Image: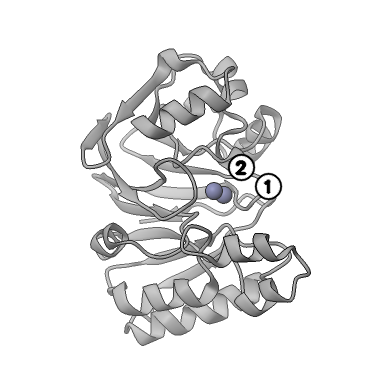
Amino acid sequence: MRFCSLASGSKGNAYLVDDAGELILIDCGIGPRTLKTQMALAGVAIDDITAVLITHEHSDHVAGLAAFQRFAPDVPVFMNFSTADAVCALYPDVCDEMIVAFENDSRFPVGDLKVRAIETSHDVSDPVGYFVEGPGGSYFHITDTGEPTVEMEEYFDMADVATLESNHDLAMLRSSGRPYHVVRRIEGPCGHLSNDQAADFVASCAVPRLKHLALAHLSQDCNSPHLALETVAKGLACAGCGQTKLTAFSQHRVSDWIYA
Ligand SMILES: [Zn+2]
Ligand SMILES: [Zn+2]
């Protein structure tokens, strides 16, 4: 099993998970041209995608979906029922024939992989992340959560590799000059996970099984890769996981593939 980021942040999100002959796209918040370019840089093509998983209906996760479907009309697009309702209402161009809706507490197959939604805390209808299990390993994927949830705690220690949001540095956010309500939304329980929150989560939940952790959805104004990595590395050390490799994903740069 391997995974990578094609785009990570508030201007668009798209991630790939590859195992057992399945190539899963998690979120489609970038346009088809960017998707094609980024996938080529990762050594794969849009035609190789076998399934899409959607986390929630915010445009930085869904805006490219309708255009993607014109290139890949037969690819199933998985999302929970509430998110499907919201996506259909907000993006009328999305082809709902290929939507496969699920209940959050179910585990569903994508080929030989097993997928389980993990509830997150975010200001949309029914936001989730994903836990993907295959013959090559297990992958935990969480972005866009204002605080850690019980399900995140439940699944994190079963992952060989993981992506976790580390959105902002709280002091940088508060001195960013953004409007008060925007700052409060981002730092609130249904906003985004700060570096400190990500570090605390990792400190209390990480186990040595975790080989590689990638930090995602970093704010370009209110964070820096250096700061996020330094903060979360302390959390890993606290959990006795000093050997876990740590990477920060970027908005525009395709990451290396990370192997389970
Ligand atoms: Zn987002
Ligand atoms: Zn969001």
Which part of the image, by quadrant, shows the C terminus? bottom left
**Amino acid tagged 1:** Lys
Place of residue 47 in the rendered image (x, y in percent of width and height, measured from the top left) = 52, 23
**Disc with the residue nearer the chain's start (1 vs 2):** 1
Q: Nearer the viewer, residue 79 or 76?
A: 79
**Amino acid tagged 2:** Asp
Position of 169 with respect to 159 (left or right) is right
- C-alpha separation, residue under disc 1 versus residue under disc 2: 6 Å
- The residue shown at (32%, 84%) is 240
Does the beta carbon at disc 2 come under 8 Å from ligand 1? yes
Q: Residues within 10 Å of mark 1 (few under 14, many from 20)?
A: some
| Residue 32 visible at all | yes
Place of residue 54 in the rendered image (x, y in percent of width and height, measured from the top left) = 45, 36
Establish if 113 lies above or below 1. Answer: above
Q: Which element carries disc 1, helix, strand or loop? A: loop
Q: Residues within 10 Å of mark 2 (few under 14, many from 20)?
A: many
- The residue shown at (21%, 38%) is 106
Establish if 12 lies above or below 195. Answer: above
Position of 193 with respect to 93 (left or right) is left
- The residue shown at (39%, 59%) is 162
User: Which residue appears farthest toward the left when viewing the image?
Assistant: 106
On residue 246, the disc is none
Report if the CB atoms under discs 1 and 2 are less than 8 Å apart: yes
Q: Which element carries disc 2, helix, strand or loop? A: helix
On residue 11, the disc is 1
Label 2 sits on residue: 60
Position of 217 with respect to 155 (left or right) is right
Place of residue 127 in the rendered image (x, y in percent of width and height, measured from the top left) = 42, 45
